Image: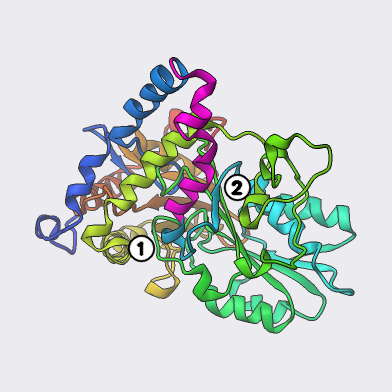
Amino acid sequence: MNAPEHPTPFDAAALDAADTLAPLRDLFDLPADVIYLDGNSLGPLPRATAERVAQLVRGEWGEGLIRSWNTAGWFALPGRLGDAIAPLIGAGAGQVLACDTTSINLYKVLAAFVGQRSAGRTRIVSERSNFPTDLYIAQGLCQQHGMTLHLVEHADDIPAAVGADVAVLMLTHVNYRDGRMHDMVALTAAAHAAGAFAIWDLAHSAGAVPVDLLGAGADAAVGCGYKYLNGGPGAPAFVWVHPKHLGPGTTLAQPLQGWWGHAAPFAFVPQYQPGAGIERFQCGTQPVLALAALGCGLDTLHAAQPLGGMAALRAKSLALTDAFIAAAQPICAAHGLRVATPLAHALRGSQVSLAWDAAAQPRPGAGYAVVQALIARGVIGDFRKGDARMADILRFGFAPLYLRFADVAQAAQALAEVLHTREWDQPQFLQQGAVT
């Protein structure tokens, strides 16, 4: 059964012709036969990365050997790349480190601020739909400190959950499942009004939506280097702490007191002394090859600066997601799906999630199978297992650095065909792999 042509409610050619960010696509090595809508999970390969890493391997490591810690500036990479991340998240110079993983950095900052809590504050508040690793880290920390992790069912109920017994409000700025974006300013203010700290995970924000940590008065933030920052699989993460917590006379201390976070790491003294400012949030030796690749990813974002920077990227992100939502809504209506991502721009990140309600799903595993059928056609999105509200989630990321409106139109047509013909309902698409 052939699917009918699905006309898109926008002129892709005209929009692409008017796109001032279009030249940035050439910074990436994208397969010609692929429409890549999964940059919210793993950014594509920047063209400069392979040569930069090869040059580091052949020259800085191969010839410079251990001298390159100084001559090639390896030791300074976490801070230098942190300074490149800072303007993307509304932080200042010398306030961000590129290091470790999101989970490790979250443990560091969460433990540090739990250590600053006043008596009687025994709860950490988060969302039940928050990314699981954040919840796991918080669960472990609560077990260590005799605290309780309180999970809010709906985003609108978060302010009411932050009471006088809450130590930390811990949220992901853009929800990884439905793409809903929190009001960082309002929720940080609500936490502070209750006497709690506010810690933010920017994994699905940094590089895709404007963030102003200093303006919001947030206490700390962590984030991922391999999604919209295009740093490569397993790229180092980043960590930021508001400088008001790190100045002279402050006592904020993180628990992973490794030698790179020491005030004088090459003094090799037995007693730990924390480094100044954000430096104390380093732990052990950092992965130089991975940091170099992350640097190339950050260069792709800074290339947008002369073209309007994050404001221009956000405007294009909203235009891309608006276009996909407009094209997908009639398809969804015909097949029992709904657009789970908020339609309001102020509540939307840079992704669009489609979901079946549990009762409407045509069969178990349908969401995963639809995504696999799309991938077989060269339209790469991803699947996330749902919860009580959403059975299966088809998730599509719209990274404005390299996506075109023509990609949106072709992806919508492919989705219509896969659903209309039930192309997805085949054994090879229903068999789940280790990574979904």
Give the class, few, some or many, for how many residues have Cα within 10 Å of label 2's Cα (few <14, many ≥20).
Answer: many
Residue 208 is situated, as x and y percent measured from the top left of the image, at 39, 57
- Identify the residue shown where x is 61% and y is 53%: 131
Tag 2 residue: 102
For the residues labelled 2 and 1, the Cα–Cα distance comes to 37 Å
Magenta residue check for 66: yes
Q: Secondary structure at mark 1?
A: helix
Magenta residues span 63-85
Mark number, residue 333 = 1
Front residue of 191/381: it is 191
Q: Is residue 37 visible?
A: no
Left or right, residue 392 beside residue 18: right
Front residue of 14/195: it is 195
Q: Secondary structure at mark 2?
A: helix
Q: Quadrant of residue 99?
A: top right
Indicate the amino acid at tag 2. Answer: Thr
- Identify the residue shown where x is 48% and y is 59%: 93
Magenta residue check for 167: no
Residue 2 is situated, as x and y percent measured from the top left of the image, at 22, 41
Q: Quadrant of residue 242?
A: bottom right
Indicate the amino acid at tag 1. Answer: Ala
- Asked if residue 236 is positioned above or below residue 316 in the image, the reply reads above
Left or right, residue 220 beside residue 382: right
Left or right, residue 357 beside residue 278: left
Q: Is residue 192 visible?
A: yes
- Identify the residue shown where x is 40% and y is 17%: 58
Principal SS element in the magenta part?
helix
Q: Quadrant of residue 308?
A: bottom left
Front residue of 12/272: it is 272
- Asked if residue 219 is positioned above or below residue 290 in the image, the reply reads below
Residue 399 is situated, as x and y percent measured from the top left of the image, at 33, 52
Q: Nearer the viewer, mark 2 or mark 1?
A: 2
